[in-house]
Image (tube, rainbow, N blue to C red):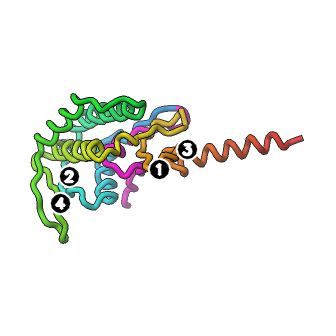
Amino acid sequence: MMSTRRMFPLISGSLSLDLVNTEVVSYGHRRELLISEQDFLDWLYTMCEAIPSLDKSILNVSKSELTDGLETIYRFRLQLRENFECIADGNNVNNKWISVLEENIENAPYMYKIVSGEIKQIPRGNWLNKVLSLVSLDALKLISEGKLNKIRRCSNPECVLLFIDMTGRRKWCSMKICGNRKKVTRFQSKEEIKKP
């Protein structure tokens, strides 16, 4: 029997933000979605499906390599979260953080290949350095394209998901997640008021 792959909230269209969003709040408690090596591998597969230009060689990783690298991924994700939240709160991008992202890319620099008629950036190095390089490049692109200035926290104070608000009107991480909950709560409140 085939196992079901874990689902992740892909609400940002960004590799680095979607990594940060592998921590969620459920029933009032922060919940880790990358509990095991298989969870992280599921996340990599999900990202390769969502972003076809990603280098698929990051999927060629053994369980022991995943085990050895998971703590590094957790630390890197925390660093991303802290910096993204700081920017969402109106602060400037930290230059030290930019240097860390650039160093990650130096550890797995890119070569370029034509794959299916398109030029792909393919990082060199071991799988962990490749993942850190790909995620770091994504974060640097958000900075250079001015998209990081549009990073927002969800309006639900219990939610920890982050997203890019390109319209200036988006309030929720997702209408399916928090926006719908708010609508249901508002509707229930109106129904309570109507009761005699």
**Where residue 181 appears, x then y in whole percent?**
61, 45
Badge 4 marks a residue whose secondary structure is strand
**Looking at numbered disc 2 in the image, what kind of residue is underneath it?**
Ile
CB under 8 Å between discs 4 and 3 = no
Residue 178, numbered circle: 3
Residue 53 in the figure: left or right of residue 129: right
Magenta residues span 1-28
Mark 1 falls on what kind of element? Answer: loop
Task: Give the residue pinned by disc 4.
Answer: 120
Q: Nearer the viewer, mark 4 or mark 2?
A: 4
Question: Which residue position holds label 2?
Answer: 58
Mark 2 secondary-structure assignment: helix
Q: Earlier in the sequence, mark 3 or mark 1?
A: 1
Q: Where does residue 17 sit, x and y in percent of width and height?
A: 35, 43
For marks 4 and 2 on the same chain, the one whose residue lies earlier in the sequence: 2
Give the distance between the C-alpha atoms of the residues marked 3 and 1, in whole angstroms.
Answer: 18 Å
Going from N to C along the chain, the mark reached first, 2 or 3, is: 2
* Discs 3/1, front: 1
Q: Please tell me which of labels 1 and 4 falls first in the chain.
A: 4
N-terminal of the two: label 2 or label 1? 2
* Quadrant the N terminus occupies: bottom left
Residue at x 37% of width, y 33% of height: 87
Q: Which residue is mark 1?
A: 167
Mark before the other along the chain sequence, 4 or 3: 4
